[in-house]
Amino acid sequence: MVTQDALDLIFNNARTHVAWQDKPVDDALLQRVYDLAKMGPTSMNCSPLRLVFVKSAAAKEKLKPCLMGGNVDKTMTAPVTVIFAQDMEFYTQMDKLWPHGGGKMFVGHEALTTSTAVRNATLQAAYFMLAARLLGLDCGPMSGFDNAAVDAAFFAGTAFKSNFLCNLGYGDASKLYPRGPRLSFDEVAKII
């Protein structure tokens, strides 16, 4: 059983940050976060998540025109912005990742491939954010951007498709919005 402190860190006190301290995030920490997150389960161990860590000024400028207006300042000031993407040809790695049958079932089945890639990459991105919080980083996930523009700028010539973005760093808690309400168990769930 995990401690209450751990539960508070990754859930109860975790917030979506929009302002950042001027403190860099070390590349080794990003790798450590990924190495923890990659251990989370995906269906058939398909592991379709692909990541681009946008850190340099040049990369930030490349990302900037892809962002909706309300996301520009918080992204430009974040130490790192992760582009979470799914590899639409993830099944080419299945012989390595799922030797029980490989990825042949996905070849030629676009709907199955797409739903599997998106679902499992999103799941892996959530694992990544939980791992980031456990290792001391704050997160600012967002979907306010032009996917086609991000794909053209960062994934041209690949089978990768952007899913969502997440700013990472050390948040400025003084700039947090009040916590929004959440739906109750009875509003969202039914036990049958």
Image: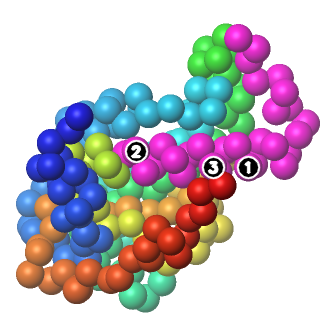
Task: Determine whether the residue tagged by mark 1 lies in a helix, strand or loop.
Answer: helix
| Labels 2 and 1 touching (C-beta < 8 A) | no
Q: Position of residue 186 (x, y in %)?
A: 50, 71
- The residue singled out by tag 1 in the image is 115
Regarding residue 65, the answer to whether it shows in the image is: no
Which numbered marker is on residue 127?
2
Seen in the picture, residue 71 relative to 43 is either above or below; the reply is below
**What amino acid is labelled 1 in the image?**
Ser
Q: Are marks 1 and 3 in contact (CB under 8 Å)?
A: yes
Q: Callout 3: helix, strand or loop? A: helix
Residue closest to the eye, 19 or 150: 19
From the top left corner, tell me how far across and down residue 191 is, in percent.
Answer: 59, 57
Q: Kindly report the distance in space between the C-alpha atoms of the residues bearing marks 1 and 3.
A: 6 Å
Q: Main secondary structure of the magenta part?
A: helix
Q: Earlier in the sequence, mark 2 or mark 1?
A: 1
Q: Please provide the residue range marked out in magenta.
A: 100-128
